[in-house]
Amino acid sequence: MRLGYMRVSKSNGDQSLNLQRDALIGAGVHPDNIYSDMASGKNDDRPGLVACLKALREGDELIIWRLDRLGRNLTHLIETVNDLSERKIGFKCLTGVSIDTTTPTGRFVLTIFAGLSQFERELTRERVMAGLAAARVKSEALARPVCRARVMGYYFWIANGRSQKYRFRARAREGPAGEAACR
């Protein structure tokens, strides 16, 4: 069975799923087997993708319109497609880079992407380690800088007899806006 997944980044109506839906139906996916999300790809919370991946069974095929609709980044994309391959589920991308893991060419292209993904992870790790080593040589702090406004706020809470637990609950309520003074 063919299942399709589609996603747009904005849920405010600026973007439409129609183009992706038409392409998936044209590729042989039944409209009842199309899952969708209206959320940014960087978000982990994509219930349509989770439901689609759970619905896939051995021998099925997942079809997407374009690669960036599936993965948050290259690493996430490779992990997802490898998971599908281990479950003996085919994967097909309709536009952009043509990947069809049911063919030798598609598996080869995926292998190249996996190598690039691993290379990217290792370069990132090297840069982080080099930055930490340079900071140690210069005796710099290896943590985020302390925000004076936040420290003063903590002293105020403690001086007024409020507990640490109460302070953290209040900070959670005020959210990111309360941290604007520390940026």
Image (tube, rainbow, N blue to C red):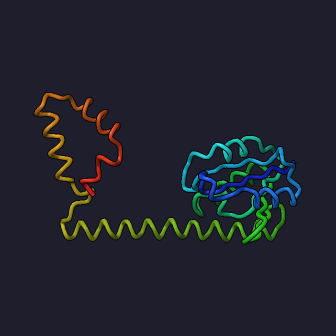
Which of 90 and 7 lies nearest the eye of the viewer? 7
Quadrant of residue 136 within the rendered picture: bottom left
Q: Residue furthest front?
A: 13
Relative to 127, is 59 on the left or the right?
right
On the image, the x and y values in percent for residue 9 come to 60, 57
On the image, the x and y values in percent for residue 114 come to 64, 65
Taking the spot 58% from the left edge, 58% from the top edge, the residue there is: 72
Quadrant in which the C terminus is drawn: bottom left
Taking the spot 73% from the left edge, 71% from the top edge, the residue there is: 96
Q: Residue furthest left?
A: 159
Label total for image: 0
Quadrant of residue 76 within the rendered picture: bottom right
Relative to 176, is 92 on the left or the right?
right
Quadrant of residue 102 within the rendered picture: bottom right
Which of 159 and 77 lies nearest the eye of the viewer? 159
On the image, the x and y values in percent for residue 98 come to 77, 70
Relative to 158, is 144 on the left or the right?
right
Taking the spot 24% from the left edge, 53% from the top edge, the residue there is: 181
